[in-house]
Every structure is written in structure tokens, then in C-alpha cells.
Amino acid sequence: MTVRAIQKGLYEVQSESQDLAYVVTPGKSCTCKAFQFRGGPCKHMISVDEHLAQQTKLGKASDTAVGLTEEELIRYAREKNGTPAGAACYLELARRQNTLKGLFS
């Protein structure tokens, strides 16, 4: 399953069987039907837990960068230049600029 941070503390997990994604709050909830009916950890929550356990410093920094404003990203990128946190900020800024280009093309 593909896991990606969508904002600080929230992850999107692609469904294996359908063309949709579920939103997971680690240790708390998932938007899938299995979690809604059973209430216990579902496979999407387990997938996020495994993702978090295996992350590198850059991966953790990237998940944090998703939740920052553009001004914060610019400031942290300069302050943390040469570190995984700085690289994550630069990558998130680039991702956002490419997303904006796609909207106006």
C-alpha cells in the first residue's frame, strides 16, 4: 500500500482493491469501512504504523514539511541547509510549485 503524508499527523493510504484512498490518523482512526464498523486497527492503520517505523530522517522531515506554510518552509530551508530537514523543506517547496504550475497550464 502506498502511504503519503497529506498534512502533519494525517496520512493517505491508497486502496489495494479500488481506485480510492483512505485518510489515516495514526493510532486513532481511518476513513475505511472496516475501521468504521469494527473500530479496531485496520490494515491501512497498520500500513501507516509500518511506514512510520521504517522512515529515515529525510522521510520524517518530509512528513513534517507537508504541514508547514510556505514562509516556514523558506525559513527552515535556509536555517537547516545541508541537513535532511533543510532538504525536505526545499523538496516540499518544489512540489508545491509544480502543483501550482499544473493548475495554470
Image (tube, rainbow, N blue to C red):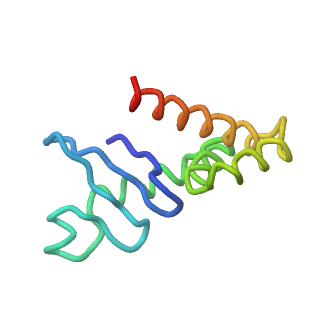
Q: Residue at x 80, y 40 (%)?
A: 83
Q: Give the vertical position of 7 relative to 30 (above or below).
A: above
Rendered residue at 18%/72% (across/down): 36
Q: Which residue ends up furthest to the front in the rendered image? A: 104
**x and y percent of residue 66 in the render?**
55, 50
Residue 3, above or below 31:
above
In the shown orientation, is residue 12 left or right of residue 78?
Answer: left
Is 31 in front, or is 54?
31
Residue 80 versus residue 60: which sits nearer the camera?
80
Q: Position of residue 51 (x, y in %)?
A: 47, 49
Could you tell me which quadrant the N terminus lies in? top left
Number of numbered discs: 0
The residue that appears at 64% across and 48% down in the rendered structure is 70
Q: Position of residue 82 (x, y in %)?
A: 84, 35
Indicate the position of residue 45 as horizontal and vertical percent values.
35, 61
Residue situated in front as seen by the camera: 28 or 93? 93
- In the rendered image, which quarter contains the C terminus? top left
Location of residue 18 (image quadrant) = top left
6 left or right of 68? left
